[in-house]
Image (spheres, rainbow, N blue to C red):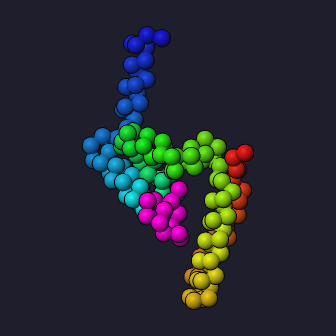
């Protein structure tokens, strides 16, 4: 394949990436989600991987370099790649989410105990049912 035949593909890929204000907006989102995800490393009830997924998505629309860094990171990269390639969630993450939601839901029902707490717990149950139906990597 010659260099000229690959030029239109590169031009299409670069034209799909937002420019100007949109690019700055997506970059700001990527940095915000990355920061929240990093806080989630230290705060047990704040999930890390969903925010890293959002950060990688936003970085893909604004900064390929940041996207490569996030997806290539030794700690954050493997779960991101597992999700992107297979829609897979590790069993350990499923159990961590289950325990966190059980503790949070119990606390809500005991200390708040109103209809909003019950609705929140119902949403948690639906999310857990969805989560446990996700495939796991062998």
Seen as rendered, the residue at the extreme top is: 2
- Res 29 visible: no
From the top left corner, tell me how far across and down residue 16 is, in percent.
Answer: 40, 35
Residue 41 inside the magenta-drawn segment:
yes
Seen as rendered, the residue at the extreme left is: 20
Residue 105 inside the magenta-drawn segment:
no
Residue shown at 39%/52% (left/top)? 30
From the top left corner, tell me how far across and down residue 112 is, in percent.
Answer: 56, 88
Seen as rendered, the residue at the extreme front is: 74
- Res 129 visible: yes
Which image quadrant for residue 19?
A: top left
| Residue 57 vertical position relative to residue 7 in the rendered view, above or below | below
Question: Quick one: 115 or 6, which is closer to the camera?
Answer: 6
Question: Quick one: 105 or 45, which is closer to the camera?
Answer: 45
| Residue 134 vertical position relative to residue 18 in the rendered view, above or below | below
The span shown in magenta is 37-49
Residue shown at 43%/18% (left/top)? 6
Q: Is residue 62 left or right of residue 102?
A: left
Question: Quick one: 17 or 73, which is closer to the camera?
Answer: 73
Q: Is residue 129 left or right of residue 34?
A: right
| Residue 9 vertical position relative to residue 69 in the rendered view, above or below | above
| Residue 102 vertical position relative to residue 42 in the rendered view, above or below | below
Question: Quick one: 98 or 44, which is closer to the camera?
Answer: 44
From the top left corner, tell me how far across and down residue 101 is, in percent.
Answer: 62, 72
Residue shown at 60%/83% (left/top)? 107
- Total numbered labels placed on residues in the image: 0
Which image quadrant for residue 119?
A: bottom right
Residue shown at 48%/11% (left/top)? 1
From the top left corner, tell me how far across and down residue 95 is, in percent.
Answer: 67, 64
Q: Is residue 52 left or right of residue 24?
A: right
In what quadrant of the picture does the C terminus appear? top right
């Amino acid at each position: 394949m010659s260099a000229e035949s690959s030029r239109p593909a590169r031009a299409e890929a670069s034209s799909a990436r937002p420019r100007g204000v949109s690019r700055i907006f997506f970059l700001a989102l990527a940095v915000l989600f990355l920061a929240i995800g990093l806080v989630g490393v230290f705060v047990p009830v704040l999930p890390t991987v969903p925010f890293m997924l959002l950060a990688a998505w936003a970085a893909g629309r604004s900064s390929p370099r940041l996207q490569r860094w996030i997806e290539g990171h030794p700690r954050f990269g493997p779960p991101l790649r597992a999700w992107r390639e297979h829609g897979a969630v590790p069993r350990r993450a499923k159990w961590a989410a289950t325990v966190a939601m059980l503790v949070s839901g119990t606390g809500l029902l005991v200390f708040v105990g109103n209809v909003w707490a019950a609705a929140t717990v119902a949403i948690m149950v639906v999310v857990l049912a969805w989560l446990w139906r996700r495939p796991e990597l062998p």
